[in-house]
Image: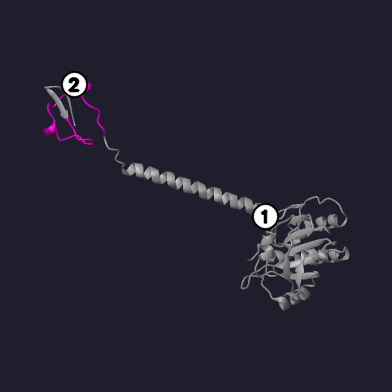
Amino acid sequence: MSVNSASTCTYTWSTYRWPAASARTPARCPVEQQPSRRVRPIRGLAARVMDFARLAAGAGLAASLSLAAANVRAESDEPQVGRAAPEFAVKDSTGTTRHLSEFRGKPVVLEWTNADCPYTRKHYTSGNMQSVQGLAQKSGVVWLSVISSAPGKQGFVNGPAADALTQSRGAAPTAVLLDPSGTMGRLYHARTTPHMFVIDKDGTLQYMGGIDSIATADAGDIPKAEPYLKEAMLAVVEHRPVAHAVTKPYGCSVKY
């Protein structure tokens, strides 16, 4: 293709590239007579890097949104005070399958426990846990101790060992539920041993959290602590509002 402005000014070019200087005649043309250069848009490394960065940013945003959605779902699945407590079907230490619904009409306390955890030992060696269990028994409250330790993990026991442990500690649960798969523990989002829940006679969750207000493994702190669980349990028995319906649980992590 050629553009001729005058016999003394002729420029020849290929569609995409200018020819070598030797192919141009004459060497200079007036600017207004020079054709526009059409250059092939050659994408360089920088442009490709920018494209990759945009794609990566998009993927990262998608992953972040997915994670956020998963967290929202997890939080929405967590038990909520004032709502129905999750139903469960778990075998106890005698091999009997227990359901929450079978205790309808009575308040229920759920206690996640691990005999090898120092925070659990704090409340058993001092007799504090047995004292609250005895009060529950006198008040017509069902007390279910739950062991969610997986086989091979700290605190795991079979049925006979669980019963022997109950006897040796002088404990007084209504039953000990064995949850080696962690199904019930995850259903309730149990995080620590101990982790306590109080359910009213209609199956509504009224309390979840710690046994008391001082998060140590020192039994000497028990008399100084506010007994959250005991207060919540008595409030439910007496049909009063629970003063501290949700508190932070403390102890060893549940060994799922």
Q: Nearer the viewer, residue 136 or 38?
A: 38
The disc at residue 143 is: none
2 or 1: mark nearer the eye: 2
**Residue 186 percent across, percent down from the top left:** 66, 61
The magenta span reads: 12-38
Q: Which of 19 and 248 is in front in this view?
A: 19
Q: Name the residue under label 2.
A: 30
Q: How crowded is mark 1: few (under 14 residues within 10 Å), some or many (20 or more)?
A: few
Helix, strand or loop at disc 1? Answer: helix
In the depicted structure, whether residue 57 falls above or below residue 7 = below
**Residue 49 percent across, percent down from the top left:** 37, 45
Left or right placement of residue 1 versus residue 72 in this view: left
**Residue 253 percent across, percent down from the top left:** 65, 62
In the depicted structure, whether residue 223 falls above or below residue 11 = below
Q: Is residue 244 magenta?
A: no
In the depicted structure, whether residue 35 falls above or below residue 108 = above
Question: Amino acid type of disc 1?
Answer: Asp
Q: Which of 3 and 125 is in front in this view?
A: 3
Q: Earlier in the sequence, mark 2 or mark 1?
A: 2
Q: Mark 1 points at which residue?
A: 77
Helix, strand or loop at disc 2? Answer: loop
